[in-house]
Amino acid sequence: MVERFAPTEYALQSLATGALFPDAGWTLDAPGEQQPALVRAVYAKTQLELKDESWGIFRYADWLPVQRMLQGSGFPVTYRSEALAAELGLESLWITFSGWWPERGARMKSGSFKETEAYAVCGRLSAEENRVLVVASAGNTARAFARVCSENGIPLLLSVPEDNLDALWFDQPIRPCVKLIASRKGGDYYDAIHLSNLACQLPGYFAEGGAKNVARRDGMGTTVLSAATTIGRIPDYYYQAIGSGTGAIAAWEANLRLLADGRFGSKKMILRVSQNWPFIPIHDAWKARSRQMLPMDDDEARRKVEIIRAKVLSNRKPPYPILGGLYDALEDTGGNVLYANNEEAMRAAELFERLEGIDIHPAAAVATATLIADARDGKLPAGASVMLNVTGGGEERFQQEHHLHFLKPSLIFDLDPTLEDVGRQLQGLSFKL
Ligand SMILES: Cc1ncc(COP(=O)(O)O)c(C=O)c1O
């Protein structure tokens, strides 16, 4: 299959000026521009030709900025809900599921839609790249990248808070091209990011880029491509739990491509994204109709993050203000930011498991809880076609069915390391297979 694969043709476009330019390999920002803005991929093919399932996530390669195909990928699966739909009184509820649910065709072994972005990002990498990709994460993203890079022999340095190491479970041992470093206990995601930023300043390492990486966004956008190609049209409403909001930006961008494709209707989905109360900074900024995030006290933010169950939704610096970011996506689609507390999310997860038959991630449970509330409160017009993005699921089931291996850190750093410290210690690491 790899032999049949031709690199996708695309250009990049600045969302500040509209300028088009080629991808120099790993372009994250528009060259020469000062205003913070996302760049977007503009694909040569305006109509998506969906490849068969054996391609995994690369069945969407026409709209992924990839040069090569990697082995072992699953893809999001969309199906029409019966039991939950009936319970909520919805005629047309579509569940897009990322995770482990083999009976439905969902085979993402790291359990979340973060695997879509990991495959797309790694597929964007040139096979000749010999620097080490650096990724900071508190959980699902780290697990997804570790798996993809291990299986495909790609050098990867992961930076994770020591308190989150239990998120690094796998069904296979991780190969030596993947190395893990951790910020010492008591640190959080921001300490892991700080550590990874220092690593990226060293020769031989480079940053993945987060929301600025078109591959990350277009990988996540495959959830919407899955929904639209299954339903036959763009859904009317989109529900997803957000931390950074990158998945929702990606959903909006996929929607815009589907509009240009012309075969999936002429609607923009109304984005109804959600956070886990009491950590709801995007909600607060949106309610104030502020493009900037509102000032946040660090200690208060940490205290709130400690409370929420869906820890992956704890981003304090989301790509919300940036041009082409979440604020614009919400504005353009008539969207809204909702929230659910732990109790509501837990009840939603129980209901989902009872009616649909699989465990879902606490983040997906937050999205489900807000959908339940909207249905109850009559916020959805009769007959509306609704997409629920179940961004993670089947994790408990996968863990029960497999013997788990944990990735151990090669180095643990103090909370405020210097560049010299990091440089000296990383010298001892080998990424050779
Ligand atoms: C299962 C799950 N759902 C939702 C999200 C939120 O995604 P985003 O950060 O793109 O908003 C995450 C982020 O890690 C996640 O792991």
Image: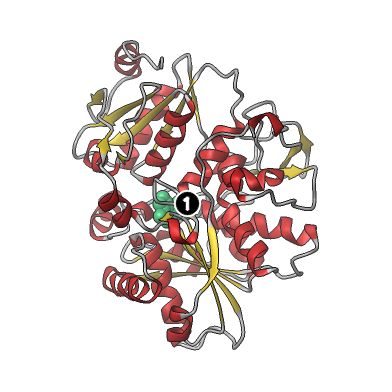
The answer to which of 41 and 417 lies nearer the viewer is 41
Task: Say which quadrant the C terminus sits in.
Answer: top left
Is residue 252 among the parts visible in the rendering?
yes
Disc 1: CA contacts within 10 A as few (<14), some (14-19) or many (>=20)? many
Residue 424, horizontal then vertical, whole percent: 31, 11
Q: Quadrant of residue 16?
A: top right
Q: Is residue 103 left or right of residue 277?
A: right
| Label 1 beta carbon less than 8 Å to ligand 1 | yes
The answer to which of 182 and 57 lies nearer the viewer is 57
Residue 431, horizontal then vertical, whole percent: 40, 17
Q: Going 29% across and 51% down the picture, which residue do you hit?
A: 401
Q: Is residue 369 left or right of residue 267?
A: left
Looking at the picture, which amino acid does disc 1 mark? Phe
Task: Say which quadrant the N terminus sits in.
Answer: top right
Residue labelled with disc 1: 113
Q: Quadrant of residue 103?
A: bottom left
Q: Going 32% across and 52% down the picture, which residue do you hit?
A: 398
Q: Determine the residue located farthest toward the left in the rendered image.
A: 185
> How is the model colour-coded?
secondary structure
Q: Give the structural element (helix, strand or loop) at label 1.
A: loop
Residue 276, horizontal then vertical, whole percent: 35, 64
Q: Is residue 412 left or right of residue 13?
A: left
